Amino acid sequence: MNINQLIFRNFKKNVKNYYLYVFALIFSAALYFAFVTLQYDPALDATKGSIKGGAAVRAASVLLVAIVSIFLLYANTIFIKRRSKEIGLFQLIGMTKTKIFRILTVENFMLYFASLIVGILIGFSFSKAVIMILFKITDTKGIAKLHFSEEALIQTLIVFGAIYLLIMTMNYLFIKRQTILALFRVTSSTEGKTKKISILEIIIGILGIIFIASGYYISAKLFDGSFTSMNALAIAMISILALVIIGTYLFYKGSVRFLLNLMRKSKNGYLTINDVLSLSSIMFRMKSNALLLTVITTVSALAIGFLCLSYISYYSAEKSAGDYVPNDFAINNSKDAASFKAALDRKKIAYTEKKIDVIQVKANVKNILENDLKSPMVDSSAMTIPMISEKSVSGVDVAPNETLFTGYNNMLQKTMAFKDSGRIELKGKQKVIPQKFVGLNRKFLLPIYFTGGGLPTAIVDNSIFNKFKQDADPSIQKESSLYTGIDISKEDDLPKANELFREMKFSDNSLNNSRIEMAASQKQNMGLIMFIVAFLGLAFLITSGCILYFKQMDESEDEKPNYTILRKLGFTEQDLLKGIKIKQLFNFGIPLIVGLLHSYFAVQSGWFLFGTEVWTPMIIVMIIYTALYSIFGILSVLYYKKIIKEAL
């Protein structure tokens, strides 16, 4: 048999035996090509009113390269280790390491680039579906076409060519460093199985739990007034990140083994076959996989957290727009308001109008805060807020010595929680008038132009309002002091009115807002971010799931002799599978649960900065992630079932 025949036979054998490596290549190529095609798709930027997503996709593609590279390099590590005995046999029959490397290079070249071509074709087939999903999420009006991009093809070939060179370098170093004896022992070598847990491991385990709990505690205190300066806030954020990541590593290094050892001791040495196949195996192997599991857990938590926050913003778009633009149209310029009303009259669109005179004042609200100011960005002793007269609001009547705040959202509640009553001071240019604070309503009356998006509006008696109007501090006043809110009488006329608003040539567009436009803009921007984060999150989920699956494949091959012994002792397949199911529940469940906890506390610490709703978006994201992640646990059980059948 000559070298060419040997290469060809090995190639056919590897396609059959190493289908997971082929799957990794095809999946990675399809994912990358479909994503990069977006970058060069003319439909993305050429469509009227569409998002300008090329730059965002380009930045995300760099992260995708990193994910794909790590995934393929890890898959190749398993692939080359499984062929270690074959490489050792080649050396035994007299082949040099250089010739063996040449054989592997040619085999890998055929396997790699054949899979790459298939992956590109699959990615091309799904590229239209990908951009259709993007258009749907961002509510972009456009026609998605099946577009083959030569630029995307060249970029994909360059990236995967570079990854191929890295893989070949890894293979060369592996062959060069291994002795013949070591090659025969690579697949049979096991991870550390020291049964006795040391005092150091107990300390590490306890520290891991303490570090994670401390990170969670600080995250819960992030915006509750404990940190009153930007430096303190930055240090707190860095501390949370460090404590959680280090704590996660220590958790896998010692905590898991420590907790499972306590469970074993509680059984007083009477272990069932399920305990042997599940708890014992996890105890001995999770420690050696601590770094890998830490990376998987941390990146999973980041992916879930970013996806939750972007979905919160997307999900809350209409509600947030209602807070920032309390009427269908907010116009803060008298000339623009007159022009828009005239245009509505010409189109015979019925509407109602509300005008509110607004001035800006300084307010000392220290005495009505639950804690001293919770936001390091605002001075609670001289906070600039908008003020309006009670006459501008129907159903509100306050005494001359009373002030009612209105415009209350979740961000204000978290960063600046007010008491139910107390004393405040309102300051003009020269006058300082003490007032009795009589409460805070949620309803927004003024647009974001006057409130800045987060500050409450003060409602005072008309006499007090007139005093401050005469004593207004010019340095803090807005360019406009009159707000005109327009509501369309018939809901069916709203789209036509909005189109008319978009076509208007206002003197200053920054002073005017449409509630529909603001909601659409937020959905468009956050939809793009959500799409990119979801795409990268899906890529990482599948790659990390495959990595854990590959690890289980390795462990199952290592434990196959144990299953043979247990089968000979009389244990059935079902007996063994019960223990295996528990083992996979721990193997996949522990990283998943820890990642979900990390993301939960991260989201809870700052979700209010992104939107008005938290539970529904967060639960939806976590359920979908859990469901997809669980697929790999099920596949691992099925693979173990196959190994158990072959064990006897």
Image (spheres, grey):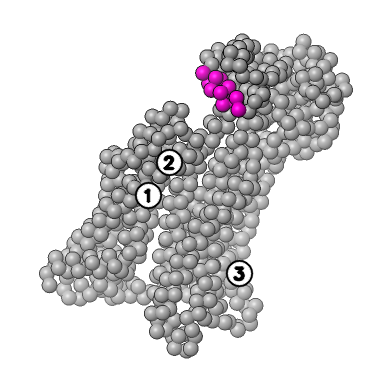
Q: Residue 601's x, y, as percent?
A: 62, 50
Horizontal relation, residue 76 to residue 409: left or right: left
Mark identifier at residue 229: none
Q: Residue furthest bottom?
A: 569
Horizontal relation, residue 586 to residue 58: left or right: right
Q: Residue 38's x, y, as percent?
A: 38, 39
Q: Identify the residue under disc 2.
A: 132
Q: Earlier in the sequence, mark 2 or mark 3?
A: 2
**What's under tag 1, amino acid-wise?**
Leu
Residue drawn at (64%, 17%) of the image: 332
Mark 3, secondary structure of its residue? helix
Mark 1, secondary structure of its residue? helix
Q: Identify the residue under disc 3.
A: 259
Check if residue 502 falls in the magenta segment.
Answer: yes
Q: Residue 107's x, y, as percent?
A: 22, 62
Q: Identify the residue under disc 1.
A: 31
Q: Earlier in the sequence, mark 3 or mark 1?
A: 1
- Dividing the picture into quadrants, the one containing residue 321 is top right
Residue drawn at (51%, 64%) of the image: 588
Please give the range of residues in magenta.
492-503
Horizontal relation, residue 182 to residue 219: left or right: left
Counting the numbered discs, the total is 3
Label 3 environment density (alpha carbons within 10 Å; few <14, some 14–19, many ≥20): some
**What's under tag 3, amino acid-wise?**
Leu
Mark 2, secondary structure of its residue? helix
Q: Is residue 493 visible?
A: yes
**Eye-nearest disc, 2 or 3:** 2
Check if residue 140 falls in the magenta segment.
Answer: no
Magenta span main SS? helix
Quarter of the image with the N terminus is bottom left
24 or 250: nearer the eye? 24
